[in-house]
Image (spheres, rainbow, N blue to C red):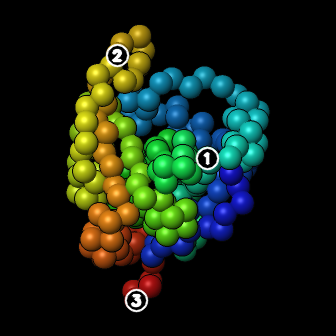
């Protein structure tokens, strides 16, 4: 869905994806290092633009570009989707950042803020292939709780892989938000934020 205001942080902004972001999305998905834990994507820019148009109309699905607050350079993408309003929960993922980006912490921090402060969720969750140690460690350090391992959850290049499910509840977020904000603020300086921002 496109009709949400940008989520502003210290050094990053999450704004709803637009058709002009299609080439950047495909460039990231063409990088073998970034996509080793993602299914292959072989589509044209026009097909990606069509997917974005459809996504912008899809209820309960928010797809964001993470871009630098100062300068506007895009760092990557993150999404909240599979919204279940009756349960007050949603999944998040479609998370990919350009090579060498230091935006991961603030990107995830802003996604949690959106989930709990804008959508008013009681919990969000993500599922990560067990091979992706870096992402798993990031979720752990953010304060998400590992709740289960899902056998054979992902299919990747003809093989099945297990996934770890992490959950953040609104109550848990209230307890870790300030520490996460402080860490995000440190990384914001690398993203061009002026001192004191």
Element at badge 1? loop
- Say how many tags the image has: 3
**Between marks 1 and 2, how big is the CA–CA gap?**
26 Å
Report if residue 96 is visible in the image.
no
Badge 1 vs badge 2, beta-carbon distance below 8 Å? no
Judged left or right of residue 56, residue 133 is left
Residue sitting nearer the eye, 186 or 113: 113
Mark 1 is surrounded, within 10 Å at the Cα level, by few (under 14), some (14 to 19) or many (20 or more) other residues, namely some
Residue named by callout 1: 61
Badge 3 vs badge 2, beta-carbon distance below 8 Å? no
Residue 160: which disc? Answer: 2
Element at badge 3? loop
View extreme (front): residue: 86
Q: Position of residue 42 (x, y in %)?
A: 60, 23
> Which one is in front in this view, the residue at disc 3 or the one at disc 1?
1
Residue 46 drawn above or below residue 40: below
Q: Position of residue 114 (x, y in %)?
A: 51, 63
Q: Position of residue 161 (x, y in %)?
A: 31, 21
């Amino acid at each position: 869905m496109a009709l949400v205001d940008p989520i502003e942080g210290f050094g990053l902004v999450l704004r709803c994806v637009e058709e002009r972001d299609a080439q950047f999305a495909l460039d990231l998905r063409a990088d073998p290092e970034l996509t080793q834990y993602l299914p292959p994507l072989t589509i044209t820019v026009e097909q990606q633009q069509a997917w974005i148009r459809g996504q912008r109309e899809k209820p309960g699905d928010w797809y964001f570009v993470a871009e630098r607050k100062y300068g506007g350079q895009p760092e990557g993408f993150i999404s909240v989707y599979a919204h279940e309003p009756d349960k007050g929960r949603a999944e998040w993922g479609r998370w990919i950042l350009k090579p060498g980006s230091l935006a991961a912490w603030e990107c995830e921090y802003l996604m949690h803020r959106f989930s709990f402060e804008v959508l008013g969720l009681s919990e969000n969750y993500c599922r990560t292939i067990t091979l992706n140690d870096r992402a798993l460690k990031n979720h752990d350090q953010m304060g998400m709780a590992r709740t289960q391992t899902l056998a054979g959850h992902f299919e990747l290049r003809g093989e099945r892989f297990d996934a770890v499910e992490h959950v953040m509840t609104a109550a848990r977020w209230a307890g870790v938000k300030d520490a996460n904000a402080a860490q995000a603020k440190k990384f914001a300086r690398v993203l061009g934020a002026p001192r004191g921002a």
